[in-house]
Image (cartoon, helix red, strand yellow):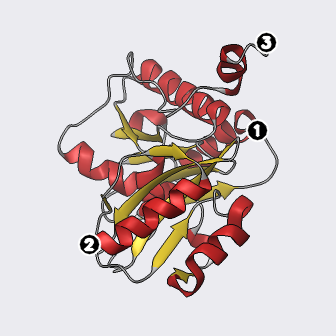
Amino acid sequence: MLILAIDGATPSAGVALLDENKIYYEEISNFKKTHSQNLMPMIDRALTTGDYTVRDLTAIAVTIGPGSFTGLRIALGTVKGLSLATNIPVVAVSTLDTLAFNLNFNHNLVAVLLDARRNEVYTAFYDASGIYPVPISDELAISPEDFVSLAHQLMVKNNYTRIILLGDGFYPYADFFRKSFNDKLLNIPTHLILPRPTALGNLAIERVKAHSYSDIFSLSPTYLRLSEAEYKLKQGEI
């Protein structure tokens, strides 16, 4: 089994090559370059470093959203092109699930936050006490204030005393979150903040074992809300 994992759902871009027992390659770029510039060279380096070609792959994994509208389209377009050219199956995994998998065997409430702009975050809450993250909420696009309110409700309901926040949606509202959670908020190192393509690949392996592949023709990103252009059109701004 050989999995190529491709993440373009956030401002960072990531590619990994792995199997059940070994990570062969992982690369993450969080510079101000577009994913259209980054992803194909990263994919090429991942494969050529190990003397592989796309046809050696068992499956291609991709983060399906929520996240950056442009980044999701670029990553999914790249994956669809590779799949259609080679007939390699595709596994689509939630961006939020992928980020939550940065933590396991952890007995605090884990929340993933992606910056959705317009004073909103994409979020979901997880039980991370086992190997794999278990969602305990829907995936949502909500305001930071509503996020904090929901977090406190889930902490009380599930007997959590601390919370961990993952993802780039933390930074725009960091002061507000620190004040809202106070000493209940646990700080984590920065290498756990971004989606890891190796985490994506490992989640995909379980689906490959079950032959749970996505239909490449109907596969589309999970946006959770209207795009900026659709929103402005609805508001009569364009």
User: Where is mark 2, residue-wise?
Assistant: 130
Front in this rendered view, residue 189 or 205: 189
**Disc 2 or 1, which lies upstream in sequence?**
1
Tag shown at residue 21: none
What is the three-letter code of the residue carrying label 2?
Gly
Q: Can residue 18 be seen in this view?
A: no
Farthest residue in the bottom direction? 183
Mark closer to the observer (2, 1): 2
Front in this rendered view, residue 120 or 222: 120
Front in this rendered view, residue 214 or 162: 162
User: Where is mark 3, residue-wise?
Assistant: 238
Q: Position of residue 52 (x, y in %)?
A: 48, 44
Report crowding for label 3: few under 14, some 14 to 19, many 20 or more residues within 10 A (C-alpha): few
What whole-number distance in Å separates the C-alpha atoms at marks 2 and 3?
48 Å
Quarter of the figure with the C terminus: top right
Report crowding for label 1: few under 14, some 14 to 19, many 20 or more residues within 10 A (C-alpha): some
Q: In this view, does 231 lie to the left or right of 110?
A: right
Q: In this view, does 92 lie to the left or right of 34?
A: left
Report crowding for label 2: few under 14, some 14 to 19, many 20 or more residues within 10 A (C-alpha): few
What is the three-letter code of the residue carrying label 1?
Thr
Asked if 129 appears above or below 38 in the picture, the reply is below
User: Where is mark 1, residue-wise?
Assistant: 34
Element at label 2: loop
Q: Image point 62% across, 57% down: which residue? A: 27
Q: Image point 32% across, 56% down: which residue? A: 135
Q: In this view, does 46 lie to the left or right of 34?
A: left
What whole-number distance in Å separates the C-alpha atoms at marks 1 and 3?
26 Å
What is the three-letter code of the residue carrying label 3?
Ile
Marks 1 and 3: CB-CB under 8 Å? no
Element at label 1: loop
